[in-house]
Image: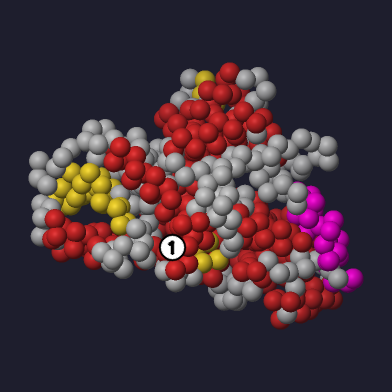
Amino acid sequence: MAKTLRLVLGDQLNIKHSWFTAADESITYLMMEMQQETTYVTHHIQKIVAFFASMRNFARWLQTSGHQVHYFSLDDKKNKPTLAENIIAHIEQHGFERFEYLLPDEYRLDKQLLDLCEKLEVSTGAYDTEHFITGREDLAVFFGEKNYLMETFYRHIRKQNGWLMDSDKPEGGRWNYDKENRKALPREIKVIAPKEFNHNVSELAELIKNAGIKTIGSIDPDHFIWPLKRSECLDLLQFFLSNCFQDFGKYQDAMHSDYWSLFHARISFALNSKMLGPREVVDSAIDYYKRHDSISLAAVEGFIRQVIGWREFMRGVYWAKMPAYAKENRLNHHRPLPAFYWSGKTKMSCLKHAIDQSLQKAYAHHIQRLMVTGNFALLAGVHPDAVDEWYLGIYIDAIQWVEITNTRGMSQFADGGVIATKPYVSSANYINKMSNYCQSCFYNFKEKTENDPCPFNSLYWNFLIQHQEQFVTNHRMKMMYSRVNKMTHAEKQKIIKQAEKYLRDIDKL
């Protein structure tokens, strides 16, 4: 075999990949902590630390398994600023005759590597990461010219793989138990403390600081809580199944100021770095459900829908619509992101809790992201570029293929309805129903225009009024617009005036 250099990126830490089945002296694996990956947006310090630490653990595993590894740390003098520069220099320096890589999951890296391979004078090859359930192009082929619909794709995947199926019908007679997955947290319920790891990452944190890399958020380098190798990811999954699974389904949308994790698995970083695979996660969940009567069908269906439904769907949309998708702004929103998204300094309790948690943990669950921070940004008319930048930087699991589709599509409706059939907007009523945030807030969640009214209320109705022409025919918004149409002209003007006042002083809210 030709002397081969194989690239492994920081989100390709898949121990089970066929590349690593047996060591080969003619093959060397290249891994790099690259400046270019730390600066395309401002990342959370915990996100950079988690990826670099996991990469180092993976490199050590490769070496102990007999593979040859060349690893460039961030401060290595041989480590060049960009991916292409490093690969070209490495091939020339060590006389490699062939270059191979695993297909990246981000469009910018895919293009970078395709452009590089056209310039290289050695033979090249690109290979599947062997991680996802569906292929890059499967969604586009499946739907063709039809509108994309997650539920349809989700059922297709279930049928193909026989997950929760009775022959050709869904187990229990229903495909989707989403209506049973929206309960608020009861006052009396036991919430077990989340599983946290205890890593010392002070050396890495100092390395990043000394390199002059701008970051957001905080870190306790003596007590880093996230899993950094496959065995820990498996432990976290097992903890979820044993301790949280039975309550996850019912309360997955709930929010509470006392609990940052509640019953969520928090395995998205493990999945998106590929230390865990979606198939093994789904198989483990279904196996646990079958062996434990305490796990309801609604719980297991709600969980696997996140993994094989939304996750695979979002990836399919990404590869079907990029690169144009990254410029979508169908609602023509242009407001800057409020300053409190970077500091958490706001009198709005829900936003304060969601943002503070994000800055402290590099994590928030899907409803905090969609119906608190995302909801407010949409109601305020923030430019989707600014929203994308924030979400891509602040969360430990954020990689563009999954972040941009969730943010620009589902959250901000900037794609005009490719992903979501309606904008995910709400007044304070929803937030109050699903959390305890409103009970300790400066603003009055019951009021629209008087007595320190919650900004969500006037902004919500103002959004519906301003976009009425675009959404009035949307069947899923019929009830909302029936209420708008019952308002008098004076009532509408009062709401608009209140919303405009809040938008003028948005950084002071």
| Helix, strand or loop: magenta stretch | loop
Q: How many marks?
A: 1
Q: Quadrant of the N terminus?
A: top left
Q: Which residue is mark 1?
A: 207
Residue 479 in sight from this viewpoint: yes
Residue 303 x/y as whole percent:
58, 36
Q: Which residues are magenta?
A: 422-451
- Which element is circle 1 on? helix
Residue 310 belongs to magenta span: no
Which quadrant of the structure image shows residue 400?
A: bottom left
Which quadrant of the structure image shows residue 370?
A: bottom right
Would you place residue 384 above or below residue 286 in this image?
below
Q: Nearer the viewer, residue 321 or 477?
A: 321
Q: Nearer the viewer, residue 464 or 455?
A: 455
Q: Nearer the viewer, residue 41 or 220?
A: 220
Residue found 65% across the figure and 31% down from its top = 243
Q: Is residue 88 left or right of residue 324?
A: left
Residue 480 x/y as whole percent:
73, 58
Residue 464 in sight from this viewpoint: no
Q: Is residue 293 left or right of residue 84?
A: right
Residue found 30% across the figure and 37% down from its top = 64
Which quadrant of the structure image shows residue 121?
A: bottom left
Q: Is residue 433 left or right of residue 117?
A: right
Residue found 44% across the figure and 41% down from its top = 229
Residue 16 x/y as whole percent:
34, 34
Q: Quadrant of the C terminus?
A: bottom right
Residue 332 x/y as whole percent:
55, 73
**Given the image, on which type of amino acid does mark 1 rest?**
Leu
Residue 445 belongs to magenta span: yes
